[in-house]
Amino acid sequence: MTHAQEHTSHTKLIWKVFAILSVITIVEVALGIVKPDSLYLTKFLGTSPLNIIFLVLTVVKAYYITWFFMHMADEKKSLRRAVVWTAVFLIIYLATLLLIEGSYIKDVLGPLTKWNY
Amino acid sequence: MEATIATDSNENNWGGGNQKPLGASYGKMMIWFFILSDALTFSGFLGAYGLMRFKFHDSWPIADEVFTHFPFLHGLHAPMYYVALMTFILIFSSVTMVLAVDAGHQMNKKKVTFYMLLTILGGAIFLGSQAWEWKNFINGSYGAVKLNDGKIIQFVDATGEQITLESFVKSQQSERTQHTANKGIWFVKEAKLPPFTINEIIESFKANPKIAIRTEQIDPELKSKTIIPHNEAMGFLNEAESVVMGANLRENEYGKTLFANFFFFITGFHGFHVLTGVIINIIIFFNVIIGTYDRRGHYEMVEKVGLYWHFVDLVWVFVFTFFYLI
C-alpha cells in the first residue's frame, strides 16, 4: 500500500521496462531463427549454449515482469520472500527431479527403440 | 494481545482488521498466494512436458518445423515470427494494464478506462491469434504416414526439404467413399477419410525416385531429423498403417503424439487463463465506468486484476521459451 500513497506517476519506468522486455524478446526470436551453429550445435552444461541463453533471458524477463509490472519491488520484504522464494525453490526442485528422471528413462528405454526397418 | 482484538470497528474483519503483517491488504495478499499456487500448477505441467521431452530427447518434434505459418504469407516458411507477434501483443497488453494501475493510483478515471479497454482488446487479439495457431496445427501442413508401431514418416524432396502429400501422390480410382448419413445406415458416423490411401502413397513414392523419407529420429550432431534414402525407404513404408493429416490428441503428423497433447493442454490451459483474465477485466472495466472505485476512494481492484493479468503474461514467457525456443 506504500504505492497508493505516493500518487506519483511511474509511466517513464513502465515504458523503460517495456523497452527492455521488447529488446530481450527480439534477441530471443532472432537467435531462435538464425540458430548460429556455434551456439546451437555445441555443448555447454549438458545442453547447447543457445538453450542456456534462452533460459537466462527468460528468467530476466520474468524478473522484470514480477518486479516492475506486478510491483513486487514495492511490496514488503516478507510478502516478496513468501511468494518468490517459495516459487523459486519448489519449481527448481520439481524441475530438477523430473528432468533427471526423464533422462534416466531415456537412457534405459532409448536403446530399445527400433529405428531401422 | 492486540492481535485478537479488532481495534477499528470500521474495518471489515474479512479485510484482516488493522493487522497487516505482510503490508498488503487481504485481497492483494490472497491474489499473490493464488498466483503462487497457479504458478506451481503451470510448473507441474511444464515439468511433465520436460520429463517427456527428455525421455524422447532423440525423437521430439522440432518446433521450427511445426509452427511455420504467418497470416497472409501463404506457403512461406516463417518459423517463430507469428509466436513472436503473439508475445508482443501480450507484453503490450501487460504494459497498458500497468498503465491503468498507475492511472488508478492518481485516481484518474478516464485514463484507467482507456487503458483497461486497450488491455481487453490486447487479450482478445491474443486469444484470436492462439485460435489461429491451433487451427494451423490441427489442420497440419504436409501430411505424413504412421507406421504400425506409431512412428511418423514424412516425405522430403532431393534437397531434404519436406514436401506435402498432395505434391507427389496421384489419386487412383477408389471404391472407398466417405460414409454420410444419406448412404447406408443413417446413425453410423465415420471419421473424415484421408485424401489418399496408403497404397496410393506407396505407388506414387515408388514412381518418384527423387523422393526420400524422413524419420522422427534426430541426428545428435546436426540436430535434424534423419533422412532415409529412397532405396531403403520401402522397409519403413511396408510397415505403414495409416495416413495422418494434421494433429490431434490421437495422432500428430509432426511426430510424437505427446507433443500435440502437451501443446494443446498447456497452451489451452494458458489460453483459458487469458480468457478468464479478459472476462474479469471486462467486469472491472464496467465497474470503473460506473464509478465504483471512484466512490470507494481507491483503485486497488484494478491493481489486483492487473496482478492476475501480468501473471498470465509471465506464464506465456515460459511457455514461449519451452515450446518454441528451446
Image (spheres, rainbow, N blue to C red):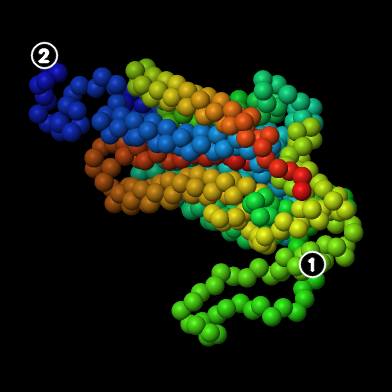
Q: Position of residue B191 (x, y in %)?
A: 56, 69
Give the residue displayed 63% in from the left and 41% down from the top: B324
Q: Position of residue A82 (x, y in %)?
A: 36, 21
- Residue A12 visible from this viewpoint: no
Q: Quadrant of the N terminus of chain B?
A: top left
Give the residue displayed 77% in from the left and 37% down from the top: B219
- The mark closer to the camera, 2 or 1, is 1
Q: Nearer the viewer, residue B33 or A90?
A: A90
Q: Earlier in the sequence, mark 2 or mark 1?
A: 2
Q: Nearer the viewer, residue B59 or A18?
A: B59
Mark 1, secondary structure of its residue: loop
Q: Position of residue B178 (x, y in %)?
A: 61, 77
Q: Amino acid at mark 1?
A: Val
Q: Nearer the viewer, residue B142 or B255?
A: B255
Q: Which mark is residue B169?
A: 1
According to the picture, the residue beneath numbered tag 2 turns out to be: B1
**Are the two marked residues, 2 and 1, in contact with CB atoms closer than 8 angstroms?**
no
The answer to whether residue B324 is left or right of residue B293 is: right
Q: Amino acid at mark 2?
A: Met
Q: Chain of mark 1?
A: B
As measured in the structure, the alpha-carbon distance from the residue carrying label 2 to the one carrying label 1 is: 83 Å
Mark 2, secondary structure of its residue: loop
Q: Quadrant of the C terminus of chain B?
A: top right
Q: Position of residue B267 (x, y in %)?
A: 52, 46
The answer to whether residue B36 is left or right of residue B298 is: right
Label 1 Cα neighbours within 10 Å, binned few <14 / some 14-19 / many ≥20: many
- Residue A66 visible from this viewpoint: yes
